[in-house]
Image (cartoon, rainbow, N blue to C red):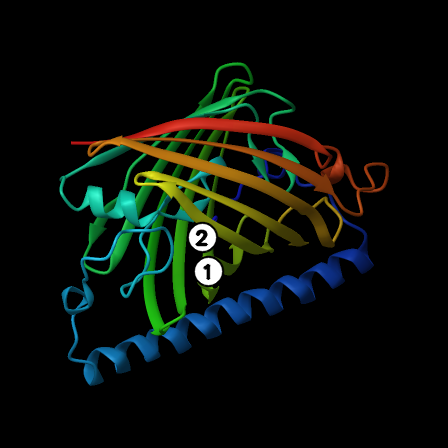
Amino acid sequence: MSYQRTYVDSLFTYLMLSEKRQLAASYVHRLTLSIIIGLAILFSSAAASTEITNDKTPSDDQTDEKPEPGITDSVPPVQAGPGGSITLKTKDVAKAEALFEWNTHVMWESRYVSEGRDNLSGDSIASLSSELIVGDINFIPWYAISPEADYEELNLNFLYGVRPLEVLAVYIGYIHLRAHYQGENAQDNEISLGLVYKLAKKYVMAASAYHSFEADGAFIEVTAKYFDKIDKGINYSVRSGLGINTGYVPDGHIGINNLELRANASYLPFIHTEIYAYTAYNIAIGRDAEKYTGDELLGDFLWAGIGFIYLF
């Protein structure tokens, strides 16, 4: 899931596109939106059918094997990650969180990056998030602030996950977003669809598409990830991902926008605390800032983040 997902300038400034480009973007993002809604209905029906025909509960699948990151027999738990994007939890953290009633995630990032863009032009951002599960719905609030840029953002994420196949998990989401940037306020509503496929042991592929009703466009991300653990409580992963703009950044170019490379590491020193960090590099693809103003913040840059989770 980022799932994520806000491009600051597009929230406050919508520059008119050429007539041909508007038409092309409209066709592409309407097709994306139709796919999101169609797959959401399809997998919701599959989930309902599975509940009727399968008597096995998640607890039936629990084993005493050593926890490791990745897909479990139930729908993999999620959390807010870098830039507010929705990411999978490691099994170590999920197991630890089951012993506590609440958790808090605190993170600092050297840049606020989404859709391949350095949204705050080099300024850092700090965030606070948590998760609450009500029935089959995951509620994930994410609050971020950057005093340097006079920027604040609140994301209210609602996700529903199903597992139609042993190696496939599907997440359907809705997000309400509110932002304050240099004295101006904006808000948006988005819907999303995320697919996570376990390609092999320790290898996961994922795809997500999210549609903005404010921009009337969508963004698609496709990623591949390798994960492992060095020792008990020490996990790491490396991933690469392609980002495709279909009107989500309305004044940016349509098509593949960026390639992101990221390395993550986490350490669980105590049962109620996890420390994690990442470093990433973004590579712009097809950037044309002279023709598309939405490409001005799209570029090649390095950034990093560090945070912790506290369970209580």
Residue drawn at (57%, 40%) of the image: 262
User: Which residue type carries mark 1?
Assistant: Gly
The answer to whether the residues at label 2 and label 1 have Cβ atoms under 8 Å apart is yes
Q: Nearer the viewer, residue 161 or 292?
A: 161
Residue holding disc 2: 1
Which residue is under mark 1? 194
Q: Residue furthest front?
A: 231
Out of 257 and 211, give the one closest to the viewer: 257
Image: 143 above or below 285? above
Tell me if residue 185 can be seen: yes
Pick whichever, 203 or 282, lies toward us.
203
Q: Residues within 10 Å of mark 2 (few under 14, many from 20)?
A: many
Q: Which residue is at 63% across, 22% downward?
A: 122
The percent coordinates of residue 147 (x first, y second) are 49, 15
Question: Residue farthest to the right?
Answer: 290
How far apart are the two marked residues, 2 and 1, measured between alpha carbons?
Answer: 5 Å
Q: Is 305 on the left or on the right of 91, as rendered?
A: right
Q: Residue at x 71, y 59 (%)?
A: 25
Residue 18's spot in the image, x, y percent? 81, 52
31 lies left or right of 170 = right
Q: Position of residue 98 (x, y in %)?
A: 17, 46
Residue toward you, 70 or 283:
70
User: In the picture provided, is 208 more to the left or to the right than 96?
Assistant: right
Q: Secondary structure at mark 2?
A: loop
Figure quadrant of residue 50: bottom left
- Quarter containing the C terminus: top left
Which structural element holds mark 1?
Answer: strand
Q: Residue at x 22, y 51 (%)?
A: 133
Q: Give the mark nearer the N terminus: 2 vs 1.
A: 2
97 horizontally vs 156: left or right: left
The amino acid at mark 2 is: Met
